[in-house]
Image (tube, helix red, strand yellow):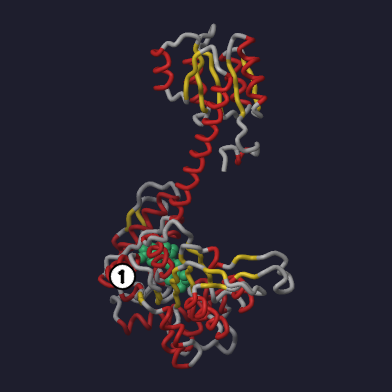
Amino acid sequence: MSASTTTGIPPGTLRILIVDDETIVRDSLAAWFRQDGHQVDVAEGGKDALRLVSANRYEMAFLDIKMPGMDGLELQSRLAAADPELSIVLMTAYASVETAVKAMKNGAYDYIVKPFDPDDLSMLVKRAAEHRSLRAENIRLKKSIDTAAPPPLLGASPAMQHVVDLVATVSASDSTVLITGESGTGKEVVARAIHAASSRRYNPMVVVNCGALPEGILESELFGHEAGAFTGARARHKGKFESAEGGTVFLDEIGEVSPKVQVELLRVLEEKVVTRLGGTTPVPVDFRIISATNRDLRAALKEGSFREDLYWRLNVVHVHIPPLRERPEDVPVLAEQFLAKFAQSMSRKPMRFSPEALDALAAYPWPGNVRELQNAIERAVVVGRNEVVRAEDLPLRVTQAPAGGPGPGSLAEAERAHVLSVLDASGWNITRAARVLDVDRVTLYNKIRKYELKKPENGA
Ligand SMILES: Nc1ncnc2c1ncn2[C@@H]1O[C@H](COP(=O)(O)OP(=O)(O)OP(=O)(O)O)[C@@H](O)[C@H]1O
Ligand SMILES: [Mg+2]
């Protein structure tokens, strides 16, 4: 990794600008650096140098301190303003410590005293190149750590506090975790929080959505394949277990995995090796498994559609996230956070809720859980015209939920009416209705069954 990778010049090569009023100094330095493989431009004074820097990119500049017109120190500060990334070296004919100290204080990379030893110059440039590439690497690492920082796990309810405690406990261990909860309750957020707090945090967390992929593709995603393992497998492909090396594999929608893949997963969990499709040699893998499901796996066990041995392997620690309607204390906490987040990301002034808007948020049963709440707040920030979010800025379904507070009976009724109205509005297009409701299709089918909803005969 070199500082120059983004600009397409060979690693270790720098673009160097030399500024000196003496031709002989300019030319001999240029010739020496070119011999070392660097790209060199020369300027005879400050004006020339500034023009070149505004037109080209340089990694390094050598400035003579004593020049007629603009001196080296003034040029230094103007170049640094034009390109803060530039590594500047000042050159002086007299070992004037005072000037050198001033240059270093102003952020110079180094200073050198004439006459120069060519080998020292080469060393200096080599060190600067390494320094730059280390700095670039640092920035890259820092970015990857920052982006790996999970969204905070918010919640004021006892139920969420329990989840937060569990996350802290299991992060310290390497045990397998099964996260259950309805769609949009925050299963992935919890998985990311566990990974980020664990000793595996500097290694990847890879996510596999087991429900979204047909069996063959899921197998190749998970375990990888060798070239020629099947039609279209042109090159060897590493599976997610291998890519997660040292990190965490998050198996989302684990309840959707076919019996065949269940057997294969069990083997990988027990033996900690994977064999790529079409391969013969088992590859050792180091991973932690977190899996999640919005299905009732115990029912699946009874039915026989989910293996008991795999279930117990996955369910060493169980984290259940209750639906948002069962933890109404979390609604205002989450809503305030989302409001602050969206207002900031849309460059709006800080915003707050009107009392009516807060009442409506509290009374609504949130069938789509935290995700639906988040979407509603995002929408309110988009449509709201001033610093106060009014009830009118919330989606209609939220403000039209029956008043009287969330009792279990009224909740079910509200949910039933809501689901039915969305289904009718979408002409019973399940995919579209599921998207509007922010649930997956399986959840929607379950609700249709639960509430015995029927498509109107005339087609609505
Ligand atoms: N406790 C929480 N604090 C902050 N944000 C949350 C919390 N719970 C959920 N969210 C946010 O709500 C959204 C949905 O969460 P997430 O994707 O983790 O849900 P999920 O349970 O995995 O849903 P699905 O079953 O549909 O995959 C995300 O944008 C997430 O950041
Ligand atoms: Mg999810």
Ligand 1, seen in the image, is in the quarter at: bottom left
Image height check: is 94 above or below 41? above
Residue 185, image x and y in percent?
40, 71
Foreground residue, 395 or 276?
A: 276
Point out the residue furthest to the right here: 231
* Residue placed most toward the observer, 154 or 106: 106
Q: Image height check: is 162 above or below 385?
A: below
Q: Quadrant of residue 365?
A: bottom left
Name the kind of residue labelled 1 in the image. Answer: Leu
269 is higher (above) or lower (below) than 25? below
Q: Which residue is mark 1?
A: 166
Residue 184: tell me if it is visible: no
Q: Residue furthest top?
A: 68
Res 237 → quadrant:
bottom right
Q: Residue at x 45, y 60 (%)?
A: 379
Which residue reaches farthest bottom? Answer: 303
Q: Residue 17: x, y in percent?
A: 60, 22
Residue 198, percent from left and from top? 37, 62
Q: Residue at x 44, y 74 (%)?
A: 292
